[in-house]
Amino acid sequence: MVKKIFSFFDRLEDFVRIELSHNPILYALVGAVGIILLWKGVWEVAELIPGLHGLGSIVMGVIILLVSGLLVSFFIGDSIIISGFKKEKKLVERTEKEILEAEKTQAQEIINKLDHLEKDIHAFVDKK
């Protein structure tokens, strides 16, 4: 029964997403309303719980974000962390030529991987 419910909502989500993707402004508005209503509900429920005012709310929020691993990735972002490990310049410090060269290198890597996959697929099909 639960599997059928999940399957129904999965198909519904796919249908709605595909339909809304044809009208990005409507998609953005639907998403904005959904997010606002979600946070309104969270806010109202948090008001009902004693101790979740001011500092208690901040502490609980930080604990939840730390435990789930979302604190750093949401507020800093993975690309900034990775660029720090690689000792790369910040995007605003790079020249246009450096950015284009990096994008060209990434595109070439993707093309090489696709070529490799295409060869593997042809080899697999030829064996059959």
Image (cartoon, rainbow, N blue to C red):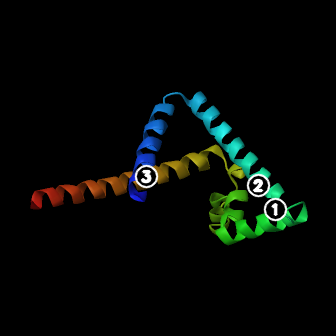
Q: Alpha carbon of mark 3 to alpha carbon of mark 2: how far?
A: 26 Å
Quadrant, the C terminus:
bottom left
Badge number at residue 13: none
Whether label 3 touches label 2, CB < 8 Å: no
Q: Alpha carbon of mark 1 to alpha carbon of mark 2: how far?
A: 7 Å
Asked if residue 88 can be seen in this view, the reply is yes
Whether label 3 touches label 1, CB < 8 Å: no
Quadrant, the N terminus:
bottom left
Whether label 1 touches label 2, CB < 8 Å: yes
- Horizontally, residue 70 falls left or right of residue 7, namely right
The count of marks equals 3
How dense is the environment of label 3, judged by Cα within 10 Å: few (below 14), some, or many (20 and up)?
Answer: few
The residue at 60%/50% (across/down) is: 98
Q: Is residue 64 above or below residue 108?
A: below
Reading the image, the residue beneath label 3 is 5
Q: In this view, does 65 lie above or below 105?
A: below
Asked if residue 89 can be seen in this view, the reply is no
Q: Alpha carbon of mark 3 to alpha carbon of mark 1: how far?
A: 31 Å
Q: Residue furthest front?
A: 1
Reading the image, the residue beneath label 1 is 49
Query: Which numbered disc flags the more N-terminal residue, 3 or 2?
Result: 3
Q: Nearer the viewer, residue 26 or 98?
A: 26
Q: Nearer the viewer, residue 30 or 92?
A: 30
Reading the image, the residue beneath label 2 is 45
The residue at 53%/27% (across/down) is: 23
